[in-house]
Amino acid sequence: MSQSRLTELTWREVRRAGEDGIALLPIGSQEQHAAHLPMGTDTLLAEAVVDRALDLLDLPGGESAAPEVVRLPALPFGHSPHHLFAAAVSLSAATLGAVLDDVLDSLVTSGYRRVMVVNGHGGNDEIMRLAVKRFALRAEVTVAACSYWTVTAGDDTAGRPEVTPGHAGWFETSLMLAAHPGLVRTPVPARAPVDPPPLFDNPPHPGLTVERHGEWERVDGSTDDASGADADRGGRLLDDRARGLARAIRAFDTASRSAR
């Protein structure tokens, strides 16, 4: 087995794994996901994609030996101030950046020189990417970061790009129906049309980031209609992201080994 969980290792095993291994940290959030999905949706989906990707890496007959990966417990809290109108447990951007910096620093001190962060919440993305860039400037480490919905195997036939990833909509609900069907409150209600449409999800010009006060509450906490979510399509979406992440881990392993 080339994958292990940090929680289950002794300190000596952690040190040994750090010599050649990749420490992998999933991060998520605890925040409202409309009326039908649980608060921990982002964390649960990040973990589901990560764990399925690690299982794929361990399958026999792969293109090369599976990289050594130590999977950390998921960081369950993220930057979610835009969801506090309903319910969320939110870290400030500065706090999340500091937490990531402390985790990375701890891993390097424990012997790791390669770290990968896999994110499940849109509000974390920019903060995560800045944190790994800043950390690599001051520590002898190679760090990678991605949000799970951005890494695909390239053969996703179940997707709807216009609502991916969205929030508490068709994409996330389909994934949750595949990964954790017992946590989805059904039937999933249809979302009433919202006029004017929210600007955060439909900016008036390509390349613009637009936020309008009160927007999330006005759209009842979701970006799109989730009532057509489907477990079978969600399973294909989940498999595609897991295959994409497995390939990304292999690519990171190859590139970071050659640079050492």
Image (cartoon, grey):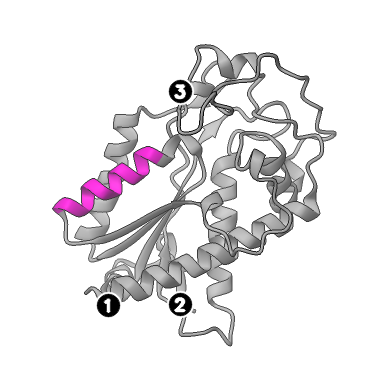
Indicate left or right for 61 with 179 as reference. Answer: left
Q: Position of residue 89 (x, y in %)?
A: 48, 27
The residue drawn where x is 75% and y is 39% is 184
The residue drawn where x is 78% and y is 42% is 229
Q: Are marks 3 and 1 in contact (CB under 8 Å)?
A: no
Label 1 crowd (10 A; few <14 / some 14-19 / many >=20): few
Sequence-first tag of 1 and 2? 2
Sequence-first tag of 3 and 1? 3
Judged by depth in the image, the label closer to the viewer, 2 or 3, is: 3
Q: Is residue 144 magenta?
A: no
Q: Is residue 133 magenta?
A: yes
Disc 2: which residue: 2
The secondary structure type at the circle numbered 2 is: loop
Q: Name the kind of residue labelled 2 in the image.
A: Ser
The prevailing secondary structure element of the residues shown in magenta is: helix
The single residue placed furthest to the right in the displayed view is: 187
The single residue placed furthest to the bottom in the displayed view is: 61
Q: Position of residue 27 (x, y in %)?
A: 45, 46
Res 17 visible: no
Quadrant location, the C terminus = bottom left
What are the residue bounds of the magenta stretch? 126-138
The residue drawn where x is 58% and y is 85% is 60
Q: Vertically, is 214 above or below 120? A: above
Q: Which of the two residues, 248 or 14, is positioned nearer the viewer here? A: 248
Sequence-first tag of 2 and 3? 2
Q: Position of residue 248 (x, y in %)?
A: 46, 65
Disc 3: which residue: 81
Gap between marks 1 and 2, in whole Å?
19 Å
Q: Are marks 2 and 3 in contact (CB under 8 Å)?
A: no
Disc 1: which residue: 258
Splitting the image into 4 quarters, where does residue 225 fall?
Answer: top right
Q: Name the kind of residue labelled 1 in the image.
A: Ser
